[in-house]
Image (cartoon, grey):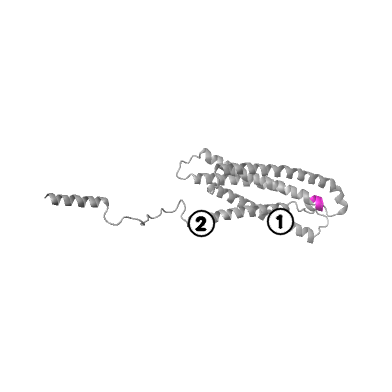
Amino acid sequence: MTTLLAAAVPLIVIAFVVLLVAALVQQRGQPVELSTSALFRTYLYLASLAGVVAFAIGLVALLNAGLASAGGGQLVYGGPPDESRQLAFASQLERRRGEDALRGLTFGTFGVLFWLVHWLARNRLSPGDQGALRRAYLFVGTAGFGVATLVFLPNGVYQALSNWLIVPASSFRQGLGDSLIPGIVALAIWLLFFRLAAGGARYDRRSAFRGGPSGPPPEPSMVGAPIGPGPSSRSAGAEAATGREEG
């Protein structure tokens, strides 16, 4: 859990930088100074990502507590393989399970509510937003949770296989809650961000193919164009005929 909290801080910092750059790019052709609306929308996306991170931390803690209740605390938190020493860790594992349950409820509830409030504010401010800030938000979420998946999931699978295939004689056995559970949660959230980002990429490609707002202007249509000389030509011909009659 401490490792997951430490990994969340760089993600928030990187997200702030990327979203700020996206807000500047979105204001191209305007003064470099960001408007209040652009800064507020940047905050909304950054706070939404922070809510997702808080929810992920809470979900990991809840899964750890639930798995510890079902399969035993040593399965999740680890412990010595010697059965004579496991009794000494029983009270400590029970305390950790209670802490994870409380932490999961707190972080999970706060993360969901925090994300929901800012999501509603984003939709009210700019419904159907497909701009640079949303693309940057999806990019940061996809990249951040993708890296977290690569860091936690392979190590968690390795620890699980090692505990199952290689039983240590006297060393401390690692639990599944250190890496495997965070890796599974990161994988699930990464898949969600990846799907949304891929959908946004398809939307951008269709807009470019159809000649969206940045495409060239359409050629003027020739349907219904008048045939024959224009009004100025007819006026000039009438004046010339009147001059010949007077002469």
Residue 86: x percent and y percent? 85, 51
239 or 87, which is in the foreground? Answer: 239
Give the residue furthest to the bottom.
165
In the structure shown, which secondary structural element does the residue marked by tag 1 occupy? helix
Cα–Cα span, label 2 and label 1: 40 Å
Q: Is residue 51 left or right of residue 222?
A: right
Q: Nearer the viewer, residue 153 or 126?
A: 126
Query: Is 100 contained in the magenta span?
Result: no
Give the dominant element type of the magenta stretch: helix, strand or loop.
Answer: helix
Residue 9 located left or right of residue 91: left
Q: Residue at x 54, y 40 (%)?
A: 39
The residue labelled by disc 1 is 155
Q: Amino acid at mark 1?
A: Asn
Q: Position of residue 9 (x, y in %)?
A: 64, 45
Q: Residue furthest right?
A: 84
Which of pointers 2 and 1 lies earlier in the amino acid sequence? 1
Residue at 75 percent across and 50 percent down: it is 63
Q: What residue span does the magenta drawing correspond to? A: 68-72
Q: Which residue is mark 2?
A: 206
Q: Dot 1, crowdedness within 10 Å: few (<14), some or many (≥20)?
A: some
Report the side of 109 relative to 234 (left or right): right
Residue located 68% across and 48% down the image: 56
